[in-house]
Amino acid sequence: MQSSLKNSLYLGLAVLSLGAVTAVSTSANAASKASIKSDVTMKTAAETRNVESTGTNALYSKPGTVKGAKVVASKTTMKKLADSKKSADYFRAYRVAVTSKGSVYYKVVTMNGKYRGYIYGGKSTDTFAGGIKTAATTTKATLPTRTTGFHLVNAKKNTLWTAPQNTQYKAKKVSMYGVKDTDTFKVSDAATKTREGSLYYYVTDEQNSAISGWIFAGTGYSATATTFGGLSTSSAEAAATNDNSVKVVYQNNGSQVGTATWITTRTDTKAGSTVGSDTTKDVNAAKQTLSSFASSSVPAGFQLTNATVSTTNATYGNTLYVDVTAAATSKVSLSVESVDNAGVSITSPLTTGTLNSSEASVALSAAGIKALSGTKGATISQDNLGVIASGFSTTFKGTKNYYAANGDAYHYEFTFNPTNFKSDNRVKTYGDTLTASFTAKAVKGAASTNTVDNSWLA
């Protein structure tokens, strides 16, 4: 009996002990959960609240340490958004919450609205930290040398935006009501989308200042180009008729590979009449004669068989046939031969090998870019390699900041080595990737940004 009583006492104590442990565990778990101490709308200027993921924290439906918080975007997804090259994957922060444990969470939404939730932001509401950091969604670009008298290529299609698309949350299209094809626009600002690298101009209708906004500008204004992005230096053309136009057909070995239509600005021409060559009268809206238009409108991947296009027998309402041959355009890969850190201990310094285009603003002259194109499969001549080599700036500055162990900012300055360019690329044919070698040296001071045409880079 005593033995039975003793066992009962032991069993009872065990149950009580288990209950005590359970109670303590439940209490500790509840205590570990944070509560929301405050959650308010952010009042600072919208553009100062553009942020990007650092890839270190997940996105939650509530502050992550609060009971009921669910994952909206995993840490893996947030890392992908951090590494994204699309502006749509930037975030806008619009609320800030502080938990009972002093953690700060920001409520954010991607520029395209796909992801929305709370992300850990450090321990202070004065700065973004933790899972997000401030983002410069655009970079200021250089104004074009010409700023007035531009036309929209197509007033119905070339939309203006309140900000370059996805660089500001809810950037929207500007109403184009009342814009005419003949309206001219002036440029007052220029910016590059940081992630995509695409150039935008801020334009205003010179006939109606209420219509203004950002428009894609392609590679930017050039005195040698009539169209760049959604802008043009010429007004819209009239509709093509037999009395005012000539159809240009491009042929390669007898097969048609492209067409274009030239429309004169003259109003006294008739079908069957000969096309004149007066460079002030017999031109289209872009001030091009039929010959210059046919030469500049060759379809991509081809080049003229002859140096110029003869229009001696061209008549209105008929077809002009132009012979072309297959062409190819090479691109250039930048390579760092050596790196001189100037005796400074730099965190994650530049290394030898391929130089990313985001590391520096490397310019190549128009003649150099032109020399990259030629007959497909043909070996690039030493003369053309020389033209390309001489088209590089001898020295140029890097656009990326590096930091020494003491926090000082450094950038690299690059020096082109033209002596190796011809020999390195002596057997390359048009369409191959060429290699341009540079040396790099660390220089104290922050990097500077400079937008250049990098369409020729591999």
Image (spheres, grey):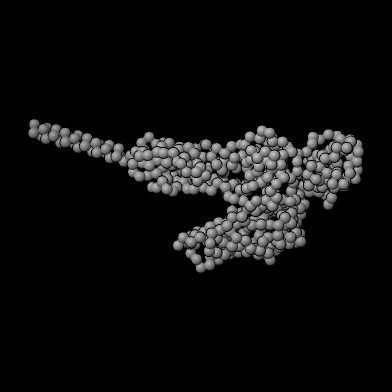
Position of residue 167 measured from the top left corner of the image (x, y, whole percent): 56, 43
Residue at image position (68%, 64%) is 418
Position of residue 144 measured from the top left corner of the image (x, y, whole percent): 67, 51
Tell me if 67 is positioned left or right of 336 in this view: left
Position of residue 389 measured from the top left corner of the image (x, y, whole percent): 70, 61
When asked about the image quadrant of residue 257, the answer is top right
| Residue 320 makes an appearance in the image | yes
Residue at image position (55%, 66%) is 340
Tell me if 169 is positioned left or right of 290 in this view: left
Residue at image position (46%, 60%) is 407
Pick the residue in front: 118 or 356. 118
Tell me if 90 is positioned left or right of 213 in this view: left
Quadrant where the N terminus is found in the figure: top left
Pick the residue in front: 40 or 430. 40
Position of residue 112 measured from the top left corner of the image (x, y, whole percent): 54, 38
| Residue 50 makes an appearance in the image | no
Q: In this view, does 345 lie above or below 210?
A: below
Q: In this view, does 147 lie above or below 417?
A: above
Residue at image position (74%, 45%) is 233
